[in-house]
Amino acid sequence: MSPRITPLVDPESGPSSRRLVWLAQDADGVPVGSASMRLFLEGGQAHLAELEISVHAAERRQGIGTRLLTAAVTAAHAEGRRSIVVQAQQGSPADEFLPARGFRPVLSLTYARLSLADADLPAIRELAERPHPGYELTEWEGTVPGELARSYAASRTAMDDMPMDGTDYGTVAWDVERLVAAAEAVARRGDLLHTVAAVDTADGRVVGFSELVVPGDGLGDAQHYGTAVLPAHRGRGLARWMKAASIRRARQLHPLLAGLLTDTADENAPMRAVNDALGYVPTHRAVEYQLDL
């Protein structure tokens, strides 16, 4: 008997995106797989859907993933989407499944981890404390302070030219409302958002940032989110400076934290060089696939 695919309601819709979810069940009602598709709502990404599909290992090669994918593609068409993107770990079953169903590879990523037990913390501290004339670092937990909010939102455009190869990712429009909503979403999960920013001392404006999300209990691994510098301020070592400060701060506040995780597009040579200099070790690679509708 073919699996039953049931659409579900996701209560976590936000101002910039909402999700559609499907559950696959066998004849006895036992869950055997699921799919989740994030629909971006704002103009720069209103054409895009971001998909995740998961099928229990023992239930694969029975058409479950194909049925879930069909449901998602049908919904994406109905929502007027132009592209669906989905990520697969290199060498995984999904890495074979997606190309066989019309997806094409558009971006390669390298995932890396910094083990805090093995990190050269004195060297990282020296990098974090090294002066950069014309700039200063500032840090905060959770939501950005009000006096920095507007320039921090403006600095987020530093991500717009991040190497994305052939991905039809569009652009993300950031404003203060979106910054606050993102920080609140992290807090609702029970995690801690820590941000380091580089400020131009000439005008007090944020020109770069590095975000780290730490598990609420301070254990396990933290996850780097964005690290970027506005084009006019690149080439001065600000990204490495901010990321070193983020590592030092995480170590100070969360002494039981095991490591820090990051992922970088293979085409983003400057950020890969920053990670290498700080001691991050590659763990695996992934491929971003895209289906053009």
Image: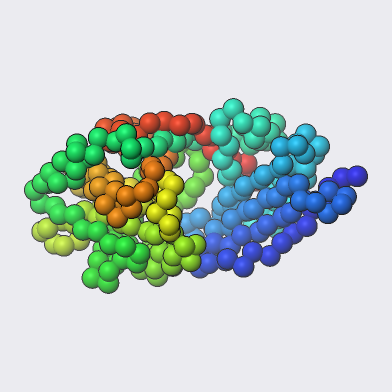
Q: Residue 206: x, y in percent?
A: 23, 58
Whether residue 62 is situated above or below residue 186 in the rendered picture: above
Q: Colour mode? A: rainbow
| Residue 82 visible somewhere in the drawing | no
Residue found at x 27% / y 69%: 145
Left or right, residue 46 beside residue 117: right
Residue found at x 19% / y 38%: 122
From this viewpoint, which residue is outermost toward the front? 256
- Give the total number of marks visible in the rendering: 0
Whether residue 160 is situated above or below residue 237 in the rendered picture: below
Assign the N terminus to one quadrant of the image: top right
Residue found at x 47% / y 62%: 190
From this viewpoint, which residue is outermost toward the left? 133
Left or right, residue 42 beside residue 240: right
Q: Residue 289: x, y in percent?
A: 58, 38
From this viewpoint, which residue is outermost toward the right? 1
Q: Residue 141: x, y in percent?
A: 32, 62
Q: Residue 193: x, y in percent?
A: 37, 59
Residue found at x 38% / y 42%: 259
| Residue 22 visible somewhere in the drawing | yes
From this viewpoint, which residue is outermost toward the top? 91
Whether residue 152 is situated above or below residue 122 in the rendered picture: below
